[in-house]
Amino acid sequence: MPVYLKEAPARPLGPSAEVIERVGSILRDIEASGPAAVRRYSKELDGWDPPSFRLSAWAVDQACSHVPDDLRAHIDWAADRVRRFAEAQRACLAPLEVEVGPGATLGHRHIPVASVGAYIPGGRYRLVSSALMSVLTAKVAGVHRVVAMSPPREDGVYAPTVYAMQIAGADEIYALGGVQALGAMAYGALEELEPVDMVVGAGNDYVAEAKRQLFGRVGIDLLAGPTEILVIADDSADPHVVAVDLLSQAEHGPTSPAVLVTISHRLGAEVLDEIDSLLRTWPTAEVTRSAWEAHGTVVVAGDVQEAVALSDAFAPEHLELQVTDPGLYEARLENYGSLFIGEATTVTFGDKGIGTNHTLPTGGAARYTGGLWVGKFLKTVTYQSLTPEASRSVAPHAAAISTAEGMHGHALSADLRHTAD
């Protein structure tokens, strides 16, 4: 049986009734009233009421000119890594054509979504890297039109975020945040904005709920809630490194879970001591301490198998392996958003641009989905082509199954092919 040295309550199963109702009210208002409602909520919630929410080419250039050269170079480096990995993923997605019987050809092809709205968070932290993860990946997939939105500051969108949007290939950039941004993109609820076919990107509880309620009208990537980390560690791990990695993700917000699963009681106790010490001087201690105290867990597993079972049950967004033999775990682990193997590999690298995408499943969703990647922006569509001879061969089977289902019109359609010259 696992032994908990620190145990957090279970993650909430979904948004509160208050969040659901508030988001629904805003979206209904935006659908009914359009630009006037978007402007009203922007002014009320963000204090932002510009002549136009869209950044002009001049405004984009001005923002980019304020980004220091060294930061530009770092963003450029990350963009290159994200682009290269997305291109490699795209190259794996080949069209298919196969003859399943004489004269019966089936196939599929991958068609990019026509237009995408990318939401780039900018609340507690201005997540510059998120622009690369969503906008650039969509562009590599072949999306023709990408609309990028991020919450405003006093003078518009954070300049490094604008720079990241621009080099990622955003076709339109807007200073607009929150539910009103998601509604504007889905409904085309601004004078100069056409609706998009899909919205992607992370955000707070209200943004995630807006995506959930908009799904169906538009496509979405996934419902990304509070970020998570789970570290599996054994006696070989450095307790200081483990503690730093746990806290580095807990700083995202006061509801971010951070979990250590270890097969070493000694290591678990030492990590707890390290965290207590680190929090005395941690640069974002106010937020990080709240997250750790409310959502931090340290559990000692009896063996590798139990450690894997605990991790898979949690299905973490980010999973680090700090163990002597990672292969023992890799072969058994099934539920995670992204895996970081070895002490030299930190979640921070994935978050900030090593190349893999940082928009990942949370709240246990890794049980059934992966994260954002180039394939999310592609529609895999099928086709069929039959010769007359193949059609006559297929028709009796289709007609018989249709009749068994009571779908006699379908049977008639099939029989026409059977009797055709």
Image: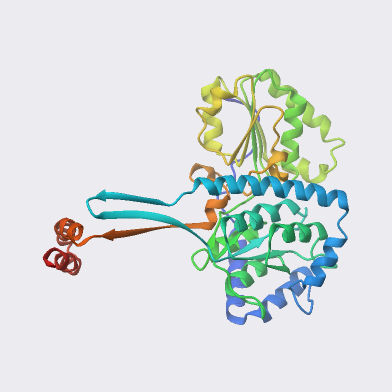
Percent coordinates x, y for residue 19 in the rendering: 62, 62
Residue 110, position as x, y percentages in the image: 47, 56
Q: Is residue 59 visible?
A: yes
Q: Quadrant of residue 68?
A: bottom right
Of residues 118 and 293, which is closer to you in this image?
118
At a point 46% along the width and 49% down the height, the residue shown is 94
Residue located 62% across and 58% down the image? 139
* Residue 310 lies in quadrant: top right
Q: Quadrant of the C terminus?
A: bottom left
* Label tally: 0
Apparent side of residue 346 relative to residue 316 in the rendered image (left or right)? right
Q: Quarter-wise, where is residue 4 in the image?
A: top right
Is residue 266 rendered to the left or right of residue 421? right
Question: Residue 72: horizontal and vertical position, in percent?
Answer: 82, 52
Q: Is residue 87 above or below residue 62?
A: above
User: What residue do we see at 84% from left, 50% from top?
Assistant: 71
Residue 306's spot in the image, x, y percent? 53, 25
Q: Nearer the viewer, residue 255 or 410?
A: 410
Q: How is the image coloured?
A: rainbow
Q: Is residue 360 visible?
A: no
Q: Residue at x 72, y 69 (%)?
A: 174
Camera-nearest residue between 421 and 56: 421
